[in-house]
Amino acid sequence: MIRSRSSGSSGKFVDLFYHADSFIIQELHVLRMIKDLYPEYCPTDKELLVYTSEYPFSSIFGFYKVIYVNNLSIADTILNTIQAVNPSVIAIYPSVLRELLDKSDNKLSCEKLKLILTNSEQSSQLERDHFANICGCTVLDEYSSEELQSIAYQCRNYQYHLVQDCSYIEILSPNSDKKLNMGEDGEVVGTNLTNFAMPLIRYRQQDLASLNDSVCSCGKTAPIMSSISGRINSSFKRADGLIIPSGKILDWTYSLVLSMNLGIREFEIVQQTLNDIVVNIVVTGNFKINQDERIIIDSFRMMFGNDYHVSVHIVSSIPRQKTGKHIPIKSLV
C-alpha cells in the first residue's frame, strides 16, 4: 500500500512525482494484462471496476476508460451500471459476481462483454468455469494484494504466471527464511517493485503456494504459480498434525453446489476447535433440509477425516467484511 510522507512543499512535490510514476506503471500493467488476455481490446472499449476504491487513473489520454462502481453498492446499482456502461471487461470479486447473477436470473445485460477478471477473494476453477458458461465470456483470475500489487494472473490456459516486473516472489518455509525448491508448497514472500514511495521488501503474504518452471503453450516464460492454497491462518488443522489448505476446502464446497446440485446460495465453513466444524449456509427452495444436511456432513468427513464433528446451520445471510469481501473459509484454531 502506498503511503504519503509528511514533509515540506518540495517533499510534497517529490511525493506527487513518485505517486504518479507508480500509478502510471500500475495502469499500464492493468492494460497490458487485459490486452494479453483479450487481444481485441481496443482504445474505445471500457473496463468496469467493481472494487473498494478507484484506480488512480480513469483512462489513458481519454482512451481505455475505466468506470468505477463501489463493490458495497446494492446489486441493482451495479447491474444498472453494467447495462449503462456496456463494458468489454469487468473486474470483480467472485462473491459480488455470484450475487449479481443470482439477482439477475443468471443474465448480465452486457452485449460487449468479452472478459471477466476475478480478484481479491479465493475462487475455484470449477466456479470460474461456471461463471464463464453463464456469462458467455472468458473468466480468469488475478492473484494480487494491496501490499505487493499484481503477483500472478491466469493465461488463456488457466495457468497463473508471475508478474515479474511488478513483484519479486519467493516461496519460503512458513517457519523460517529457507527458500523452497520448485514444486514445494510454502509461504508466498514478495518484494514490491513498483511502489517507490513505501517499498516493501520480502513481505510475508501469509498465503500458501508453490512455483514450477514447466513450459506453458501460451508462450509466456514467467514461472507458474501452482497450488495457490489460500491463507495460512485459514487452513484447517487435524488432530494428527496435518494441515488442510483452505483452497482444498473451497473446492469441496463448490462440488456441493455445482456437482451435487445442492440448493446452496452462500456458505461459510468455520473450524471452531480442533474437532468441531460449523457449516453456515444460505439455501434456496431446492435445499432438502434433512437429506442435504446429511450429505454435507458425510462428504466433509469422507474428504477430510472422520475425527471432525460437523454441524450445519441454515442462516438468512452471511456477514461480509467492511471492504465487502466474503471470507468463506475460516479457522479459529
Image: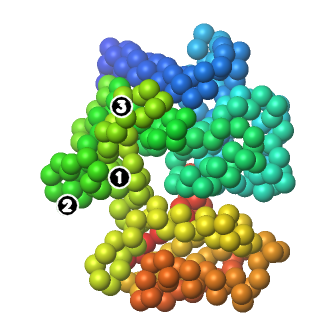
Furthest-top residue in this view? 61
Task: Indicate the quadrant containing the C terminus: top left, top right, bottom left or bottom right.
Answer: bottom left
Label 1's element? strand
Q: Is residue 197 visible?
A: no
Q: How is the image coloured?
A: rainbow
Q: In the rendered view, tell whether residue 95 sits above or below residue 117.
A: below
Label 3's element? loop
Residue 189 x %, y % = 28, 46
Three-letter amino acid code at disc 3?
Answer: Ala
Disc number for residue 175: 2
Three-letter amino acid code at disc 1?
Answer: Ala
Confirm or deny contact between disc 1 and disc 2 (CB under 8 A): no
Which dot, 1 or 2, sits closer to the camera? 1
Which dot, 2 or 3, sits closer to the camera? 3
- Residue at point 80%, 35% (across, down): 110
Residue 302 x %, y % = 50, 82
Residue topped by disc 1: 209
- Residue at point 56%, 80% (across, down): 299
Q: Is residue 38 left or right of residue 190?
A: right
Label 2's element? loop
Q: Residues within 10 Å of mark 2 (few under 14, many from 20)?
A: few
The numbered mark, 1 or 2, whose residue comes first in the sequence reads 2
Which dot, 1 or 3, sits closer to the camera? 3
For this rendering, which residue is in front, 239 or 218?
Answer: 218
Q: CA distance from mark 1 to mark 3?
A: 16 Å
For this rendering, which residue is in front, 22 or 160?
Answer: 160
Three-letter amino acid code at disc 2?
Answer: Asn
